[in-house]
């Protein structure tokens, strides 16, 4: 619309000028260098317009001629870049297909057409690495360190080579340098964090969590948990060095950060127990029991109780009141009730526990109850058979690889997963029908005094539970 209005305005001006010159004709005489020119005003104006047009065309022609080398250079450069990019694309495709020879052939074309050798070195290094020539790949990555723009990618390549060679010391150095160049790169942060854990540099790992938070590498809950794990790992080292006061401070700090952290609670309660500070043991267990009850904490708590069995039952009832519906509360109270010969209390809690989650220890406790309350050996035998088919008892176990440990550790000794060890049962679940029909399909058995079930018709093979049938 605006262009139309402008066109109409220009046309109107030209028409007006034409009409005005037609209505006002006149003559003009020009004398210059002995020459005389006589003409009308319109002819003079037309001549000036033609002269201006010729001058503009001459100026445009001169500009094109003057700029032709640069234009021609840009045209040729564009063609070279296009060929270089095409060679780079083909090299990457050949590398992805595993044809190293063809990939190196295209690499030479990239080097010929593209001025920047960063892509050439990167492609050559990857091809050499794929071909198993790690030394050649390392030389290319090291050459990339000379330029600031490619230094980070060179360090990433060297880091991967060091990890492949299991040279964790060199890998840690490369990861630190790469992190200094790009402190918020998620991949570098994760790799550096794992390497710091392997070298047990807990303080540096705690500092790295600040950068991880800024880069949103981990969620807030995961950051809190990892921070508590690292603080607990420092406390574990302090315990090994005999610095119990420092260890207590660190463990309390870890529990303040993550109150449901079982590892820190067990270490702190165990440390207070070794220092004969039973009241503090019970305080730690009571606080942890609200969010994360476990059998190991219950055992530590029960060991600190003094007095007769009925007094211990009252102390346990006070503890489990913090989390009465949890299966660990029911089991701990049932064990205390068995020791105090409170059969009804023990049976009601065991039945609740089995309804929630049937495990081998539940059936063993029921078998103990049948023997002590009713002297029913047959019923106890059936319950022990069910225990052999039930879900196994929890223990300190790695959630990543399933390996067992005798205590809590910050990293799994088998797979080195950080923070994966917890008080948990093995990943094995039995169908309810198996447990219900186990007694019917079992062979005749006898029960030893220790609660071991021995198959009498299996050529001496032993089918047994890992724990005694009768528990105090």
Image (cartoon, grey):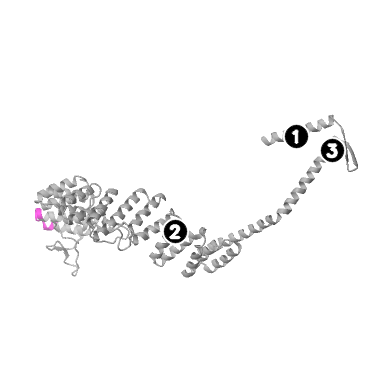
Earlier along the polypeptide chain: callout 3 or callout 1?
1
Between the C-alphas of marks 3 and 2, the distance is 76 Å
| Quadrant including the C terminus | bottom left
State if disc 2 and disc 1 touch (CB < 8 Å): no
User: Is residue 375 magenta-colored?
Assistant: yes
User: Is residue 77 magenta-colored?
Assistant: no
Between the C-alphas of marks 3 and 1, the distance is 21 Å
Which residue in the structure is indicated by mark 3? 44
Q: Secondary structure at mark 2?
A: helix
How many numbered discs, if any?
3
Q: Is residue 320 above or below residue 407?
A: above
Which residue in the structure is indicated by mark 2? 178
**Residue 350 showing in the rendered view:** no
Q: Which mark is residue 328?
A: none
Name which residue lies at 67% across and 35% down. Answer: 2
Which residue in the structure is indicated by mark 1? 11
Is 304 displayed left or right of 176 in the figure? left
């Amino acid at each position: 619309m605006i262009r139309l209005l402008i066109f109409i305005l220009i046309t109107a001006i030209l028409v007006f000028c034409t009409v005005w010159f037609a209505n006002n004709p006149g003559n003009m005489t020009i004398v210059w260098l002995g020459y005389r020119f006589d003409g009308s005003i319109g002819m003079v104006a037309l001549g000036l317009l033609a002269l201006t047009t010729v001058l503009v065309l001459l100026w445009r022609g001169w500009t094109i001629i003057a700029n032709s080398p640069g234009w021609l250079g840009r045209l040729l450069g564009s063609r070279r870049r296009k060929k270089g990019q095409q060679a780079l694309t083909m090299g990457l495709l050949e590398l992805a297909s595993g044809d190293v020879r063809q990939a190196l052939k295209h690499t030479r074309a990239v080097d010929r057409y593209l001025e920047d050798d960063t892509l050439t070195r990167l492609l050559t290094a990857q091809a050499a690495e794929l071909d198993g020539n790690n030394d050649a790949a390392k030389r290319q990555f090291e050459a990339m360190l000379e330029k600031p723009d490619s230094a980070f990618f060179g360090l990433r390549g060297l880091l991967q080579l060091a990890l492949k060679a299991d040279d964790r010391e060199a890998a840690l150095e490369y990861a630190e340098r790469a992190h200094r160049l790009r402190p918020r790169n998620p991949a570098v942060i994760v790799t550096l964090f794992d390497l710091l854990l392997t070298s047990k540099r807990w303080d540096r790992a705690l500092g790295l969590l600040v950068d991880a938070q800024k880069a949103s590498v981990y969620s807030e809950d995961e950051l809190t948990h990892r921070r508590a794990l690292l603080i607990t790992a420092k406390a574990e080292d302090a315990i090994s060095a005999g610095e119990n006061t420092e260890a207590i401070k660190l463990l309390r700090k870890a529990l303040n950060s993550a109150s449901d952290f079982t590892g820190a609670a067990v270490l702190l309660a165990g440390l207070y127990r070794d220092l004969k500070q039973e009241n503090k043991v019970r305080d730690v267990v009571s606080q942890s029991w609200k969010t994360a009850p476990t059998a190991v904490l219950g055992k530590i708590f029960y060991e600190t109780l003094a007095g007769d069995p009925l007094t211990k039952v009252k102390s346990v009832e006070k503890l489990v009141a913090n989390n009465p519906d949890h299966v660990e509360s029911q089991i701990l109270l049932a064990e205390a009730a068995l020791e105090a010969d409170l059969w009804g209390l023990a049976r009601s809690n065991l039945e609740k526990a089995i309804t929630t989650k049937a495990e081998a220890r539940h059936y063993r406790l029921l078998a103990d109850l049948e023997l002590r309350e009713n002297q029913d050996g047959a019923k106890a035998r059936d319950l022990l058979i069910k225990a052999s088919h039930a879900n196994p008892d929890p223990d300190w176990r790695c959630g990543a690889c399933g390996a067992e440990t005798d205590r809590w550790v910050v990293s799994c000794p088998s797979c080195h997963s950080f923070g994966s060890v917890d008080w948990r049962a093995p990943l094995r679940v039995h169908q309810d029908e198996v447990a219900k029909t186990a007694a019917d399909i079992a062979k005749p058995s006898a029960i030893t005094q220790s609660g071991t079930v021995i198959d009498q018709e299996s050529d001496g093979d032993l089918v047994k539970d890992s724990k005694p049938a009768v528990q105090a």
